Image: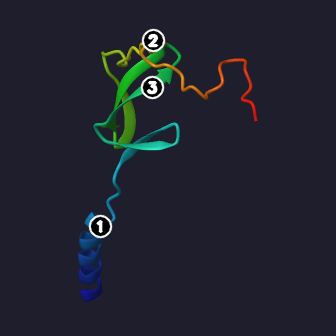
Amino acid sequence: MLTAWTLLLFLLESGTAMAAECSCRYFGQSYKLGETVCLRGPNGLRLARCAMNLNNTSWQPLDRQCPLSAVTPPSPASHPAAPDAPRIGERKAG
């Protein structure tokens, strides 16, 4: 009987230490529960959250589109090329 109690105590103590941190994976990277990522699917880009579903991690699609940023190219006047930099199509002498 002592062995059964010892085994029970061992299992109870080690159960919390053996609990794995759950995560979702996308393109080789791990994401923690609650993190959001922009997933590429058959219907285009979609925002999704890492969540638990029936004891498994899963991506839950959200009702929001992926945030996009607009990049404005710099104007040539505000960013002149360095004097010694070759222009497009030219080779640097040397």
The quadrant the N terminus occupies is bottom left
Q: Residue 37 in the image: x percent, y percent?
A: 38, 30
Depth check: 24 or 11 in front?
Answer: 24
Question: Which of the labelled discs sits on residue 17, or is there none?
Answer: 1
Question: Which of the labelled discs sits on residue 81, or is there none?
Answer: none
Judge depth for marks 3 and 1 and give the one in front. Answer: 3
Q: Amino acid at mark 1?
A: Ala
Quarter assignment of residue 94 = top right
Marks 3 and 1, how far apart at CA: 33 Å
Q: Which residue does the numbered mark 3 point to in the structure image?
A: 39
Quarter assignment of residue 74 = top left
Depth check: 17 or 74 in front?
Answer: 74
Under circle 2, the secondary element is loop
Which residue is found at the position 26% from the left and 83% from the top?
6
Q: Amino acid at mark 3?
A: Leu
Which residue is found at the position 35% from the left and 15% from the top?
65
For label 3, the crowd category at 10 Å Cα-Cα, with few meaning under 14, some 14 to 19 and many 20 or more, is some
Under circle 3, the secondary element is strand
Q: Residue 87 in the image: x percent, y percent?
A: 65, 19
Q: Which residue does the numbered mark 2 point to in the structure image?
A: 75
Depth check: 22 or 85 in front?
Answer: 85
Which of the two discs, 2 and 3, labels the residue nearer the N terminus?
3
In the displayed orientation, state which residue is furthest to the bottom.
2
Which residue is found at the position 39% from the left and 31% from the top?
59
CB of mark 3 within 8 Å of CB of mark 1? no
Quarter assignment of residue 78 = top left
Q: Amino acid at mark 2?
A: Ser
For label 2, the crowd category at 10 Å Cα-Cα, with few meaning under 14, some 14 to 19 and many 20 or more, is few
Marks 2 and 3, how far apart at CA: 33 Å
Q: Residue 34 in the image: x percent, y percent?
A: 28, 37
